[in-house]
Amino acid sequence: MAPQLFLPYVVSGKKLRLVALTTKLRGDLYYKNAFSTLGADYACQDAAMLAGLTKSYFKVFLNGQFNNLDTIVHSSQRADVPVVNLYGQQLFSSYADMLRRGAWNSKVQLQDFNGRNLSQWREHHGLSEILAWQGLRQAQREANIFSQDCEGFTNRDPMKLGYATDLLSGQLFQSREITCDASQVVLCIEAFDENAVITDPADYRRRRRRRR
């Protein structure tokens, strides 16, 4: 997983990593007998641990039936902590900027937890695009209660629809309709910087449960 000796746009200090799972998931995000964001959260954390990111707490960058993209990252980390790739290269100036713009630095690539650039997925599998499941923000869910998100990512029915985005486009929010039985790339985001004051993942999980 070691990067090159010199990389441009590397951030020092606080940062939140955005990384792809090494395997794709269907629209119900099933993993280890769990569904929706719970299953995908397990997958993200397992992948992070295998990659040696043992101090970090990763969550899936998707909404569930009762939550949305706005609140995945801890409130103290949303406004001024840069979002980076696996090797620490800046993608966005902050999580808030990431949600607002959706388009990252075109000179920086996303990786999976094995350290592969997603462009290598295309070359290895002969694909013209790399589609990832796309989540919804609070305003999107409130504007349309029938939003296409595989019923809060609980359903893999081929008659149901979700949104996807082509990661090779450098965009997070293309909103392309796709059937929920499809297997797509899943992105994971650090919920808070590993050196933040809140460093106990279990404590963060308890706080989120109380707010629901």
Image (cartoon, rainbow, N blue to C red):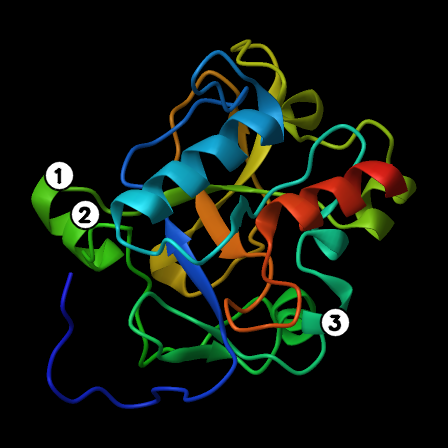
Q: Element under label 2?
A: helix
Q: Is residue 38 above or below residue 75?
A: above
Q: CA distance from mark 3 to mark 1?
A: 40 Å
From the image, state whether disc 2 or disc 3 is nearer to you: 3
The residue wearing badge 3 is 76
Mark 3 Cα within 10 Å, few/some/many (few <14, many 20+)? few
Secondary structure category for the residue under label 1: helix
- At label 1, the amino acid type is His
Looking at the rendered structure, the secondary structure element under dot 3 is helix
Residue indicated by mark 1? 125
Label 1 Cα crowd, 10 Å radius (few <14 / some 14-19 / many 20+): few
The number of callouts visible is: 3
Q: Nearer the viewer, residue 16 or 159?
A: 16
Q: Earlier in the sequence, mark 3 or mark 1?
A: 3
**Mark 3 or 1: the one toward you:** 3
State how far apart marks 1 and 2 are (Cα): 6 Å
Q: Residue at x 18, y 47 (%)?
A: 121
Is label 1 in contact with label 2 (beta carbons under 8 Å)?
A: yes
Q: Is residue 174 above or below residue 148?
A: below
Relative to residue 111, is residue 160 drawn left or right?
right
Snapshot quadrant of residue 202: top right
Type of amino acid at the residue the image marks with label 2: Trp
The 10 Å Cα crowd at callout 2, few under 14, some 14 to 19, many 20 or more, is some
Identity of the amino acid at label 3? Ser
Above-or-below relation of 211 to 148? below
Q: Which residue is mark 2?
A: 121
